[in-house]
Image (cartoon, coloured by chain):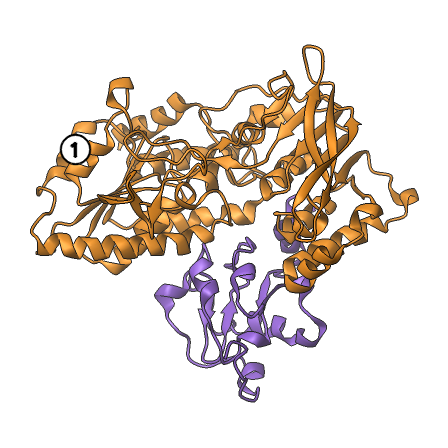
Chain colours: A purple, B orange
């Protein structure tokens, strides 16, 4: 525990991080992207994904999201638990590119996201 | 003609580096010189982020990537200001040599707490303490960690950093980059009780939920919350319903308040006190107590004093009520707000006119609020303004003389460039490796400069 939450999770072998959930789907406001100091928020077709290994847990993204789509993993509402796996697994095929801006949008989505019905924008 | 645009950015912290990155990405012709006062870059990421936050310190890697860009020239150990009092170069000289100058010097001082006793020995500025434990070259070398009971005033993330560093058992700092003398200082600390004193209610604090939770995750530290402080009025209920972060904060505090006192067996304790504002610091020759005035919120959460006081017997008081910017000689400064007056990043003179070619971004522009990432979106606005003006400048053929920027840097002589910093970086990693750590910071300015220079000569 000594080194804080980030270090603790390393010893547990699990990436504890911020997670983007349903309100982002088909909206992709991107305010979080401008805020992220390490550029670890990547764009899929239908939503944005936080890279669990590149994220430094600073929390800058969470308050700027206009639809409150971003949660610290422990605070992810029960009905959105699948989004943790979706955020992590989205990067299985991508690796750690080390920056979303230089990578650009990544075609496709996690299968769970791709299968969702079209979402009405919460900002509309 | 757009070939020889040159921009000087003052301050190689997150504000300056993000501004440089955004600028280079939007204009492929611009040449950027990034000036830093200290021998090392990264500003508050290096000298403000808490050493027990290794993941957040990794922002430094992202900043490093930006500085590797050959179109950005890092020039450290340069003081910008009044040349008559020893500064290397003035703002006016920079404005003549560059097409634009961006002030990104941040905020590195404590806001004054004007109460009786604030100057007593044992009353410390939080920023000074952070500078000490983060190994800032200008910080005190020794820190008197002698009190068993201490008070920390403030409700922001820095107050939490200071509280956490004071109460953490030093064995938990063993894998951090703190210098040896800092580690030795913490090992001698006899602290048992820390009182975190907060003027507002639990739904109106400024710190982030993660930082708060971390306090409760420390080994052998109990966090004690008075359930009476958690009775939410209508305003607080509204804040909790409206903001997810505040909801999480109140939930965390409630969990702590519900802990059975019999389960509190830790050797160190943090006591959170809400609705208390500092009245005076007491002591004969040094701090022995702090007197707080109880406060009450109105229907909008605004705080007023009640006249009722409560005294905490403490041997040290840390004032962490906010950071404040230092004015830059030659640049307007609004003393009341502690910022440079601006419009979308364009620096304004007394009559509200834009001073041509002068911009500001980061904490010195908007005050010390937000997380490090907020500085990135802030820089985008200033750079938008700057690029619009530069285009106009080029149209009028009014650019700075070709070669002027290079001549100015040449004149500055033996400063620390990117290569010099990489040598310091390497020396710190080597020092850390000797201790089985990733890095151990070098503090002394001359030592930093020696590493930067000697290594360069041996190449």
Label 1 belongs to which residue?
B408
Residue B44 in the image: x percent, y percent? Answer: 46, 39
> Residue shown at 53%/54% (left/top)?
A56
> Residue shown at 73%/30% (left/top)?
B292
Q: Quadrant of residue A81 in the image?
A: bottom right
Please determine whether, in this image, residue B330 is positioned above or below residue A99.
above
Does residue B188 appear in this view?
no
Residue B97 in the image: x percent, y percent? Answer: 15, 38
Residue B323 in the image: x percent, y percent? Answer: 51, 36
Instruction: Pick the residue in front: B107 or B112.
Output: B112
Chain letter behind tag 1? B
Left or right, residue B193 beside residue B385? right
Instruction: Pick the residue in front: B23 or B349.
Output: B349
Quarter containing the C terminus of chain B: top left
Instruction: Pick the residue in front: B25 or B427.
Output: B25
SS of the residue under disc 1: helix
Please determine whether, in this image, residue B94 is positioned above or below residue B4.
above
> Residue shown at 90%/48% (left/top)?
B260
Q: Quadrant of residue B444 in the image?
A: top left
Most distant residue in the right direction: B262
Q: Quadrant of residue B330 in the image?
A: top left
């Amino acid at each position: 525990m000594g080194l804080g939450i980030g270090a603790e999770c390393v010893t547990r072998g699990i990436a504890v991080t911020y997670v983007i959930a349903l309100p982002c789907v088909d909206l992709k406001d991107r305010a979080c992207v401008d805020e992220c100091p390490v550029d670890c928020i990547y764009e899929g077709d239908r939503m944005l994904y936080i890279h669990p290994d590149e994220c430094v847990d600073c929390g800058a993204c969470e308050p700027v999201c206009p639809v409150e789509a971003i949660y610290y993993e422990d605070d992810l509402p029960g009905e959105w638990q699948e989004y943790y796996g979706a955020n992590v697994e989205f990067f299985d095929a991508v690796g750690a590119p080390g920056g979303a801006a230089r990578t650009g949008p990544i075609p496709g989505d996690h299968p769970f996201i791709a299968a969702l019905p079209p979402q009405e924008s919460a900002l509309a | 003609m757009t070939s020889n645009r040159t921009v000087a950015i003052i301050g190689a912290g997150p504000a300056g580096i993000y501004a440089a990155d955004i600028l280079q990405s939007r204009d492929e012709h611009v040449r950027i010189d990034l000036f830093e006062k200290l021998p090392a870059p990264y500003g508050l990421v290096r000298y403000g982020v808490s050493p027990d936050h290794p993941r957040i310190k990794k922002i430094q890697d992202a900043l490093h990537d930006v500085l590797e860009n050959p179109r950005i020239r890092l020039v450290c150990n340069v003081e910008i200001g009044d040349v008559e009092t020893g500064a290397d170069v003035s703002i006016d000289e920079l404005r003549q040599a560059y097409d634009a100058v961006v002030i990104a010097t941040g905020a590195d001082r404590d806001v004054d707490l004007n109460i009786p006793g604030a100057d007593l020995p044992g009353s410390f500025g939080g920023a000074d303490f952070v500078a000490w434990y983060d190994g800032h070259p200008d910080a005190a070398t020794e820190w008197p960690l002698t009190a068993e009971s201490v008070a920390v005033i403030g409700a922001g993330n820095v107050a939490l950093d200071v509280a956490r560093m004071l109460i953490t058992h030093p064995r938990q700092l063993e894998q951090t980059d703190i210098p040896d003398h800092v580690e030795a200082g913490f090992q001698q600390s006899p602290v048992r009780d820390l009182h975190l004193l907060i003027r507002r209610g639990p739904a109106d604090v400024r710190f982030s939920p993660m930082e708060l939770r971390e306090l409760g995750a420390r080994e052998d530290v109990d966090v004690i919350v008075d359930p009476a402080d958690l009775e939410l009025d209508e305003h607080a209920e509204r804040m909790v319903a409206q903001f997810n972060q505040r909801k999480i904060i109140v939930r965390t505090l409630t969990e702590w308040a519900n802990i059975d006192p019999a389960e509190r067996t830790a050797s160190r304790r943090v006591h959170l006190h809400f609705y208390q504002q500092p009245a005076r610091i007491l002591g004969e020759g040094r701090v022995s107590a702090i007197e707080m005035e109880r406060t009450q919120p109105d229907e909008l959460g605004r705080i007023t004093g009640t006249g009722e006081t409560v005294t905490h017997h403490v041997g040290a008081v840390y004032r962490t009520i906010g950071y404040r910017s230092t004015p830059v000689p030659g640049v307007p400064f609004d003393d009341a707000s502690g910022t440079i007056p601006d419009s979308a990043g364009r620096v304004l003179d007394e009559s509200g006119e834009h001073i041509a070619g002068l911009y500001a971004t980061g904490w010195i522009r908007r005050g010390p609020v937000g997380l490090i990432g907020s500085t990135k979106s802030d820089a985008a606005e200033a750079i938008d303004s700057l690029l619009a003006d530069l285009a106009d400048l080029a149209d009028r053929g009014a650019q700075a003389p070709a070669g002027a920027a290079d001549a100015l840097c040449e004149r500055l002589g033996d400063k620390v460039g990117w290569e010099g910093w990489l040598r310091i970086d390497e020396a710190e990693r080597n020092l850390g490796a000797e201790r089985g750590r990733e890095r151990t910071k070098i503090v002394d300015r001359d030592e930093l400069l020696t590493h930067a220079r000697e290594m360069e000569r041996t190449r």
